[in-house]
Amino acid sequence: MTTPHPAEDQEPYGSEGRDRSLDVAVTGMAGRFPGAPDIATWWRALLRGEVLTTRLDREALLAAGENPAVVDSPDYVPVRGLLADADRFDHELFGISPREAALMDPQQRLMLETAWRALEDAGCDPTREERVTGVYASASSSAYLRAMLTSHTLDAAGVEEALRANEPDYMATRIAYRLGLTGPALTVLTACSSSLVAVHLAVQALLNGECEQAVVVAAAVDFPQLGHVHLPGGILSAAGACRPFDAEADGTLAGSGVAAVVLRRHEDAVDAGCSPHGVLIGSAVNNDGRAKAGYQAPSATGQEAVIRAALTAAGVGADTLGYLEAHATGTRVGDPIEWSAASSVLRELGAAPGRIAVGAVKANIGHLDAASGLVSLIKTLLVVRDGKVPPVAGFRSLNPLLETAGSPLRVRPDGFDWDGDGAPRRAGVSSFGIGGTNAHVVVEQAPAPAGPAPEDAPDGPEHLLVVSAATPDALRASAARLADWLPDHPAVPLADTARTLASGRAPLPYRTAVAGRTRAELAGRLRAAGAARAVGRTAPPVVLLLPGQGSQYPGMAVPFADALPGFTTALDDCLTRLAEGPAARVRAALFDPGFPAAELERTELAQLALFCVEYAAATALGGLGVTPVALAGHSLGEFTAAALSGVLDLTDALALVTARGRAMGACPPGAMASLAVGEDRARELAAAHGLELAAVNTPESCVLAGPAAAVEALAAALDGPERARVLRTSHAFHTSLLDPAVPLIEEAAAGVRLGRPAVPYVANATGALLPAGTAVTARSFAEQARGTVRFADGLAAVARAHPGAVCVEAGPGQALSGMAVAAGLTAVPLGGRQGTWRPSAPCGRPGCPGPGGADPPGPPGAPARLPLRRPRLLAPAATVRTVAPTAPAPTPGPAPEADAAPARTPGDLVAARWTELLGRPGLTPDADFFDLGGDSLLVVRLAQRLGEDLGVRVPVRSLLTGPTLAEHTALAASLLLAGDPR
């Protein structure tokens, strides 16, 4: 998602002289709302002024557990903001067992998923986030917990489990634990204002240096989601509609939803290359105290004070605001008080009459209680970002009790565009809680990106889009959502999309990938991407391929510099170690596409330029977490491998490559040709034409070399399948024509310190994979330049040592990738003249979608990783009002009862108790108790249960040290045999 471009005459961002060191950027956001599964869908509905609440029919209410007498009451209002699939949860993603998940309040489960999605929207991989990240969580009171506790079916241990799975004390810390976040983890509860208060606390933590990033997440999901009984004089609507500031307003309406935002200091976000959704420039929190009619009543004095304090913190006047997202509950008392308070303070602070448009999202979705402030903030961020103010849904005429004379506020029944009058758009967000804790935040449009996104073109570079998910269904859904998203968002560069998908998303076990040059091409291939391939939760080993001379071309560093974070820094490190003249020549050859190709073919320049590009690309990949298990360099590429493995210091490697290139360049000229033949046939042709075998690249591909005239004669003599392709080289490398260079290279190698490889690499002369720790001699570097490159043997050795490895060609061209594929390996070319696929680190911009499931900026998650068929997880009960004591497997099929008679064998008995405690049937002997979601407390319960069943003492330590089902079964059998009674 990108920020809309401002008008051409707009003043530069921050030109009014504000101190922006205290600004906080919103780098990610996600949410699920009544009638909308994601922010993009929700925003489109808001712009259309849709009411997204649902009128429930009698059958649905009874099926959900509502009392028939209540449903049939004339005062019953069967309407609410209904959140679809609120009971579904992707527990596998977080390593939570089905039973633990079934005991957790759906609010807390949804908060986990949504925090994950918001982090991904911020360009973060939640499984590898290294910033100190705080968590600020809010949720409504747990009706789910009340249903379990009032069922009178839980034993003492079950009550403890239910409390641990639901109480608010564990709300934020559970998210921090499951996502590995190490900043402050605080639960914030101030009734309706909870989540906006949490935003304020997160902002303060960022500014105080308590964390580098903060996730604010909130949920409000009643259980079950039903209508309400209207009470005369109460705050709930009799008509079943929330109509803020309207003459027909008669109360509010309950809604369900979940939302999250990710915050960073604005300076840090900009330095990291983020394009934020918006900027928080001021916030404040206070309490009414006793200055109101009663505990639950609002106070105009408190509301005025919090708005004034937020604007003071922002350092701006009310005359710069154009929008206010009001708390706006649609109640007869609350709305007039809020209108009066806001009008008074905004007028006092300089807002002109009718300047500020009022929004009220509760008219669309109802009152989301503890999550309402955060939902209002997200809506306001969209308003200032896109410059579009939605209508107040259902609004007809202004409440006559509102004082409009001279008020800066106005309510429009229609939506309109907001151009900002040449200045950054600014808005306020209010949230007021029962009990008097008020919060207000001032929001500003983020600065525009540097320039418009380039158009995709059929002849442009290829982009690789990778998608992963936790299940095959989720993968298919994610690919389809990404395919739908791409054509609708031309402002998001494909390179950014590819970058974040590749590196800004968690690598999940089911994956697919497509390549293409245009959005339409990529979307079509995503839709056609059928079966998913399971690759396991552990990433496959990576082998780096490092090409040799012949792959170079002018400007070959440009694609890497554009798309690979860390490449330029690593390249500069190489160039600064060279003398000024050579460094300038290499830099010009690497970055100027117009550099003379003939000059770059000169050996001394080509080899040095290739080494620098390969070393920098490999170093940058290492910075992104790509750690190779082996290196395979072709000819010159072996020198790069030696440097990367630790045999050569970088300065020594550059000196040795320089000496090698100079020595080879001084040798007699020659030529080389590639043929699609095996080694035996290549030797026959070499003997017939006075040539030598320079390289065996694959079982069916070799290179012959020698005098240029002989190579030309070979090329002229061959046709058809054996046709020779003359390579772009100036010499006959790896032949006797290079004999004069051998002693010079050995002398140069003898002058540097040679270490031992920390990473195995292929020795070209032998085709062997040198193990880590092998002694490397100066003579081997000289022989390598003269002998045949046995690359096919080297790749075969790699395939034997690392079956299933993925080979990444870290240099220009794609030749080595083809050789790796011929050896039965998977290969990915990192670059090429006509097909750079642009890997990279998370761009951090909201417009970069990903397989993990963030809502792409405004779009419907590109893709949202939540699968279509997340399991429905509820603690089993006869009705929604009761809960079984042991909450067995919430998956299809019967589960053993907690108090069933002892099983016939120790294996059956242990498996039954595992299923009871973890909610997982169909166990295998190698299943691991902890991998399936168990923890130390559940192990204690398991020991107790097994002890009761066996009549013996079951040591907890033994269960911990041998955690598989087979080991637990063996332990149970041995305890029975020993007969150690309880």
Image (cartoon, rainbow, N blue to C red):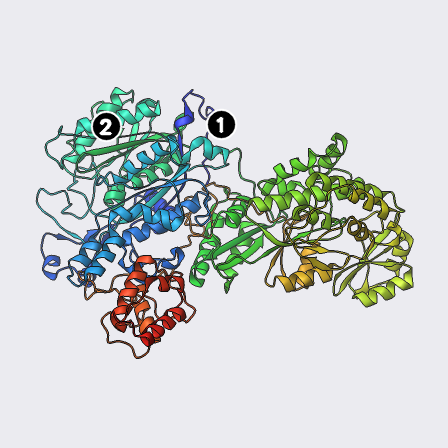
Q: Nearer the viewer, residue 489 or 280?
A: 280
Q: Is residue 928 left or right of residue 953?
A: right
Q: 284 or 101: nearer the eye?
A: 101
Q: Is residue 602 visible?
A: no
Residue drawn at 43 percent across, 32 percent down: 266
The residue under the point 53% across, 57% down is 539
Which residue: 30% across, 38% down? 198
Q: Nearer the viewer, residue 917 or 714?
A: 917
Q: Secondary structure at mark 2?
A: helix
- The residue to which callout 1 is attached is 8
Q: Look at the picture and state if 950 lies above or below 634.
A: below
- The residue beneath circle 2 is 342
In the image, is 771 to the left or to the right of 19?
right
Observer-nearest of 828 and 917: 917
Outermost residue, bottom direction?
A: 904
Residue 377 rendering spot, x and y as whole percentages: 32, 38
Residue kind at label 2, given as amino acid type: Ala
- Image height of 645 relative to 802, above or below: above
Against 348, residue 663 (above or below) is: below
Q: Amino acid at mark 1?
A: Glu
Q: Disc 1 on helix, strand or loop?
A: loop
The first of marks 2 and 1 along the sequence is 1
> Splitting the image into 4 quarters, where does residue 594 fall?
top right
Crowding near the residue tagged with mark 2, few <14, some 14–19, many ≥20 C-alpha atoms within 10 Å: many
Residue at image position (10%, 32%) is 293
Q: Is residue 100 left or right of residue 736?
A: left
Mark 1 neighbour density, 10 Å: few (under 14) some (14–19) many (20 or more): few
Residue 634 position within the rendered picture, expressed as x and y whole percent measured from the top left:
73, 53
Q: Position of residue 549 (x, y in %)?
A: 76, 48
Which quarter of the figure is the N terminus placed in? top left
